[in-house]
């Protein structure tokens, strides 16, 4: 085992790798409860006609399994200390844009995730990944990440009750005296304090503390069933398992679904690449500014997406929280294997789903939004031809309640502003192709 994971070469040992794996798990364990709430659209009473609500328990199991298998594959096959789980932002796009706004049922949305994962595998195996990554300018990649951050935070403020609807101004300040809103505000404050103090897993601990306070205050019903209301049987995957495969034939000729698939693919594409580079750099695993075994790492990521889609969850991707484990000394793939094993163990704690309400998960959405919005600082705002498409991408996501719309608008403006500034030679042919694709998308919508 030591030789397989190259402990001696990397200067690590079992104890260090175990602690690193546990640290990574605690830093990203919030996804076990946030993802089921998000995909099941908890708190949304009225769904579009013909749309049903995905089973929350099945999503919990699918989330844990996708995270466990994805992390173990990454650790054993690619040998990186990088853990995977259903991605924040992609789950919001799945639930709020595809299902809620576009009225596409969850099984067809899962089929879209499945297709994007299969395409990702093909792009990785054939080497086309690098060409597509190089074709899209870094400023647009950064603006997509920042825009998703604002969108997630906006959803969090809504779920918390801090922002409410208004007939006059569309949005307004919510009823802050509401007990559940006050609980969410408490959760935000606690999470901020923990993270500001540098406590690993601050988001997860913040959710636990907020849930306990909510139960003490009588705002949340204590968990029931199982052992002490905490440990219980693993929720069945039957409601979601294989639904993506069954729905596959119905989406392949749908223009709307191909835009959805393209968005799933695009966001996962660059989120994964950025995470791999960031974690590998921190761990000192980069060689000559290149990522060893990059193809294997990307294959592990795309394989996890396919497995997750079949099980019943949105796109599975590499987690930036893996840096917490690296910070604790993790250097080998054994760190990711340990994290994966903890996700398997977490399957026994499904009764806790009942106490993790939307007020409890709202702070996690807001904090993750803050972290993702940090990409704003790296955009070249001084160049108007860059600032316009970047800003349009960022602002359109929360205002239109759609990640796909934000990407589409930004990718339409980019070649226009660059051409008008005489920088047409800097535009890759793929960007022109995407310009016409997204333009056709808006024409089709109208």
Image (cartoon, rainbow, N blue to C red):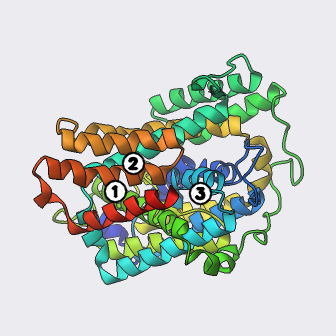
Query: CA separation, marks 3 and 1?
Result: 25 Å
On the image, the x and y values in percent for residue 175 come to 69, 19
Residue 110 in view in this figure: yes
Q: How many numbered dots are placed on residues in this image?
A: 3
- The image position of residue 106, as x and y in percent, is 68, 63
Q: Which one is in front, 215 or 97?
A: 97
Element carrying mark 3: helix
Give me the C-alpha separation between circle 1 and circle 2.
10 Å
User: 289 or 126, which lies in front?
Assistant: 126
Say which label, 3 or 1, has the lower sequence index: 3
Q: Are marks 3 and 1 in contact (CB under 8 Å)?
A: no
Foreground residue, 114 or 36? 114
Q: What residue would you read off at disc 3?
A: 98
Residue under label 1, please give it: 274
Q: Nearer the viewer, mark 3 or mark 1?
A: 3
Instruction: Identify whether 187 is placed above or below 151.
Output: above
Real-space CA distance between mark 2 and mark 3, rounded to the nearest whole angstrom: 18 Å
Give the mark nearest the N terminus, 1 or 2.
2
User: Is disc 1 in contact with disc 2, using a CB cutoff of under 8 Å?
Assistant: yes
Seen at 52% across and 26% down, the residue is 193
Q: Which residue is mark 2?
A: 145
């Amino acid at each position: 085992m030591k030789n397989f994971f190259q402990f001696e070469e990397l200067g690590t040992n079992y104890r260090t790798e175990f602690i690193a794996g546990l640290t990574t798990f605690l830093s990203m364990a919030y996804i076990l409860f946030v993802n089921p709430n998000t995909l099941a659209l908890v708190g949304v009473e009225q769904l579009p006609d013909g749309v049903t609500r995905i089973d929350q328990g099945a999503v919990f199991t699918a989330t844990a399994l996708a995270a466990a298998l994805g992390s173990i594959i990454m650790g054993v096959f690619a040998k990186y200390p990088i853990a995977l789980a259903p991605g924040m932002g992609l789950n919001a796009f799945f639930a709020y844009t595809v299902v809620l706004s576009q009225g596409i049922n969850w099984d067809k949305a899962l089929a879209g995730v499945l297709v994007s994962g299969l395409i990702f595998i093909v792009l990785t195996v054939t080497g086309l990944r690098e060409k597509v990554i190089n074709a899209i300018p870094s400023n647009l990649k950064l603006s997509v990440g920042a825009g998703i951050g604002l969108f997630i935070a906006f959803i969090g403020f809504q779920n918390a009750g801090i922002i409410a609807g208004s007939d006059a101004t569309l949005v307004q300040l919510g009823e802050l005296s509401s007990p559940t809103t006050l609980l969410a505000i408490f959760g935000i404050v606690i999470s901020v304090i923990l993270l500001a103090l540098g406590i690993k897993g601050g988001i997860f601990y913040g959710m636990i503390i907020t849930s306990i306070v909510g139960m003490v205050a009588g705002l949340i019903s204590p968990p029931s069933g199982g052992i002490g209301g905490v440990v219980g049987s693993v929720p069945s995957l039957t409601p979601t398992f294989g639904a993506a495969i069954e729905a596959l034939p119905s989406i392949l000729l749908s223009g709307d679904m191909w835009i959805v698939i393209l968005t799933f693919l695009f966001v996962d594409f660059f989120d994964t690449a950025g995470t791999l580079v960031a974690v590998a750099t921190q761990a000192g695993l980069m060689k000559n500014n290149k990522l060893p075994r990059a193809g294997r790492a990307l294959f592990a990521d795309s394989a996890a997406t396919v497995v997750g889609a079949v099980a019943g969850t949105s796109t599975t991707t590499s987690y930036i929280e893996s840096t917490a484990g690296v910070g604790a000394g993790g250097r080998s793939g054994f760190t990711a294997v340990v994290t994966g094993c903890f996700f398997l163990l977490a399957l026994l704690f499904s009764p806790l789903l009942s106490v993790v309400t939307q007020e409890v998960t709202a702070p996690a959405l807001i904090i993750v939004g803050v972290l993702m919005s940090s990409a704003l600082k790296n955009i070249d705002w001084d160049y108007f031809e860059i600032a316009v498409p970047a800003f349009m991408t960022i602002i359109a996501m929360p205002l239109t309640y759609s990640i796909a719309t934000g990407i589409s608008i930004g990718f339409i403006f980019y070649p226009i502003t660059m051409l008008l500034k005489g920088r047409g030679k800097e535009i890759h042919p793929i960007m022109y192709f995407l310009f016409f694709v997204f333009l056709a998308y808006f024409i089709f919508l109208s």
